[in-house]
């Protein structure tokens, strides 16, 4: 007795726009309204551009994609009996708090990926997103006990060192600069800098301590002011800022002073 004939979709059906293609030569679903040639060319170009990025840049890109996609790919799970039930990267025993602790200590995302070869850039993006939306306690056996909260939003004054800005970003803070908002090299008045930062709900980062302290005392209706002393230890200064704001529940209306430690 001859076996049943297997149904094979026609070539036209297999290549219908908007339908997943089962043909062996096709690997992607073509969106409705797209020409196949345009779609394949666009994706191939994107893949080449992504491949040219550094691991850290790929991690940042993945993080933005995950945020744009919402909860489509959570990638985090909590399982009883696995790491005490703490949130871990899916199908691993790598807790989110371990990755966040490394990031808070200034470890670059590329170095984290090299430390955990099983992880992908999207795993880090999922971890940072989880930390940004929830509070969790870091293990006290590593000496880190404070709760993780959403990172601060900063507006760095034109006089603020870029290496400190970059280190704060590595620590997870959202930092933009006067130069990046198109106000550099314009001798923008102090009060205008504070107004711009407040309108964007950002705390000012500045070395111009005397004048911004005066602005704070004159009107505390702002998103926060962090004044710092000049410090050649850029990495150390970023960590001191990070620690100073970590203990502040709400930066709005607050003046935080970060001073260079005595020699």
Image (spheres, rainbow, N blue to C red):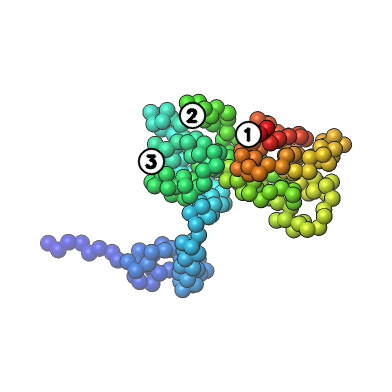
- Give the label, 2 or 3, closer to the camera: 2
| Residue 28's disc number | none
| Residue 91's disc number | 3
SS state under label 1: helix
Q: Residue 155 in the image: state x and y as whole percent.
A: 72, 47
The residue drawn where x is 75% and y is 43% is: 207
Question: Mark 1 or mark 3: which comes first in sequence?
Answer: 3
> Would you say 21 lies left or right of 258 here?
left
Estimate how packed mark 3 is, as few (under 14), some (14 to 19) or many (20 or more) residues with alpha carbons within 10 Å: few
Q: Up-down: is 83 above or below 203?
A: above
Residue 122 shows in the view: no
Residue bearing mark 2 = 142
Labelled pair 1, 3 in contact (Cβ < 8 Å): no
The C terminus is located in which quarter?
top right
SS state under label 2: helix
Estimate how packed mark 2 is, as few (under 14), some (14 to 19) or many (20 or more) residues with alpha carbons within 10 Å: few
Q: Residue 42 in the image: state x and y as whole percent.
A: 50, 68
Residue bearing mark 1 = 243
User: In this figure, what is the number of numbered marks?
Assistant: 3
SS state under label 3: loop
Residue 109 shows in the view: yes
Residue nearest the viewer, comparing 195 with 177: 177
Question: Mark 1 or mark 2: which comes first in sequence?
Answer: 2
The residue drawn where x is 42% and y is 48% is: 114
Q: Residue 233 in the image: state x and y as whole percent.
A: 63, 42
Q: Up-down: is 110 above or below 214?
A: below
Residue nearest the viewer, comparing 57 with 199: 57
Marks 1/3: CA–CA distance: 32 Å
């Amino acid at each position: 007795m001859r076996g049943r004939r297997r149904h094979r979709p026609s070539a036209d059906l297999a290549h219908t726009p908007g339908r997943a293609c089962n043909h062996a030569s096709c690997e992607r679903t073509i969106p409705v309204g797209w020409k196949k040639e345009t779609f394949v060319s666009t994706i191939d170009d994107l893949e080449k551009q992504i491949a040219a990025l550094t691991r850290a840049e790929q991690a940042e890109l993945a993080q933005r994609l995950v945020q744009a996609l919402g909860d489509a790919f959570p990638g985090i799970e909590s399982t009883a009996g696995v790491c005490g039930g703490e949130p871990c990267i899916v199908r691993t025993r790598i807790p989110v708090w371990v990755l966040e602790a490394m990031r808070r200590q200034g470890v670059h995302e590329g170095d984290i990926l090299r430390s955990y070869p099983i992880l992908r850039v999207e795993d880090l993006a999922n971890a940072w997103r989880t930390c940004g939306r929830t509070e969790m306690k870091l293990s006290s056996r590593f000496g880190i006990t404070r709760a993780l909260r959403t990172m601060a939003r900063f507006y760095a004054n034109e006089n603020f060192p870029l290496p400190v800005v970059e280190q704060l970003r590595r620590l997870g803070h959202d930092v933009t600069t006067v130069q990046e908002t198109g106000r550099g090299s314009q001798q923008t008045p102090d009060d205008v800098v504070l107004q711009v930062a407040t309108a964007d709900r950002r705390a000012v980062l500045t070395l111009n301590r005397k004048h911004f302290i005066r602005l704070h005392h004159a009107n505390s209706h702002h998103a926060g002011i962090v004044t710092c002393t000049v410090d050649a230890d850029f990495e150390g200064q970023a960590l001191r800022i990070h620690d100073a704001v970590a203990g502040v529940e709400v930066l709005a209306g607050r003046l935080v002073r970060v001073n260079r430690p005595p020699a």
